[in-house]
Image (tube, rainbow, N blue to C red):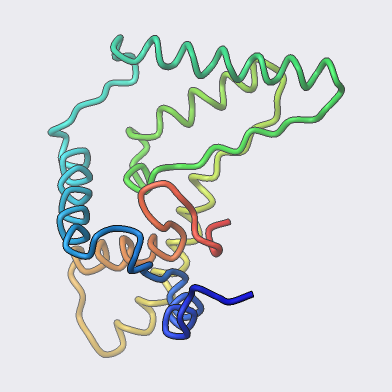
Amino acid sequence: MVSMVSEEQREQYFEQVFFIADDAIEPDMLEQLVAAAERACAKIRSGAVMVEADDPRFDAGWRLVLDNLAAIYAVAREREIDVVLLVYPFVFQLFDPELQTPQRRLLMHARTQGVDAIDLTPVFEKWICADVDQILGEVRQTHDLVPEDVDLIRVFQAKRYFFDEDHPTSVGN
């Protein structure tokens, strides 16, 4: 079988846990897509896009999700299949408990259904904090850092675990 991945991409993947597939999108679109993603994340982080936990605009969507999960749980119980719900965060939810309401809602629903659930948000936060602490231990020996530097290191380290805002890398799995 012939590999479509170049040696350079293979090395980048093993060193940085990702590689850029040149043919995934038109090359001139990459910069625009990255900028759009950064603007969307900035709006959410800044509060410009306010999403309240009890916002009625999301009731129908939540009802659909929770009803489908309940149906899955019922079929699994009927067939005596154990189910564990794994709840992944979006990157922008990390380190901000106010943005983690969806995780709490899913965990509560699973609990009321008698289903085991694992919220991976604190796991990723712990891993990223450990990475940042290690980096800071090394960097602070030679450089003074301001809080913004630490925030940037945290964002950079999150990229070890996520390809984008919500898909984990091999390290994140």
Q: Residue sitting at 36 percent across and 69 percent down? A: 20
**Residue ID at (43%, 69%):** 18
Looking at the image, residue 22 lies above or below residue 94? below
Horizontally, residue 73 falls left or right of residue 130, namely right
Residue 69: name its quadrant.
top right
- For this rendering, which residue is in front, 128 or 31? 31
Outermost residue to the front: 1
Q: Nearer the viewer, residue 159 or 64?
A: 64
Q: Where is residue 101 in the image (x, y as percent from the top left)?
A: 40, 28
Q: Depth check: 9 or 99 in front?
A: 9
Quadrant for residue 107, please give it.
top right
Q: Pick the quarter of the image with the C terminus.
A: bottom right
How many numbered tags mark residues here? Answer: 0
Q: Where residue 57 appears, x then y in whole percent?
A: 29, 12
* The furthest residue to the right: 80
In the shown orientation, is residue 70 left or right of residue 105? right
**In this rendering, position of residue 109 left or right of residue 134:** right
| Residue sitting at x 37%, y 84% | 138
Give the answer, above or below, for where 122 lies relative to 112: below
Identify the residue shown where x is 15% and y is 55%.
32
Q: Which of 141 and 64 is in front in this view?
A: 64
- The quadrant of the picture occupied by the N terminus is bottom right
- Residue furthest to the bottom: 142
| Furthest-left residue in this view | 48
Query: Residue 148 at what x, y percent from top left?
Result: 18, 64
Position of residue 76 relative to residue 33, above or below, is above
Relative to 43, 79 lies left or right? right
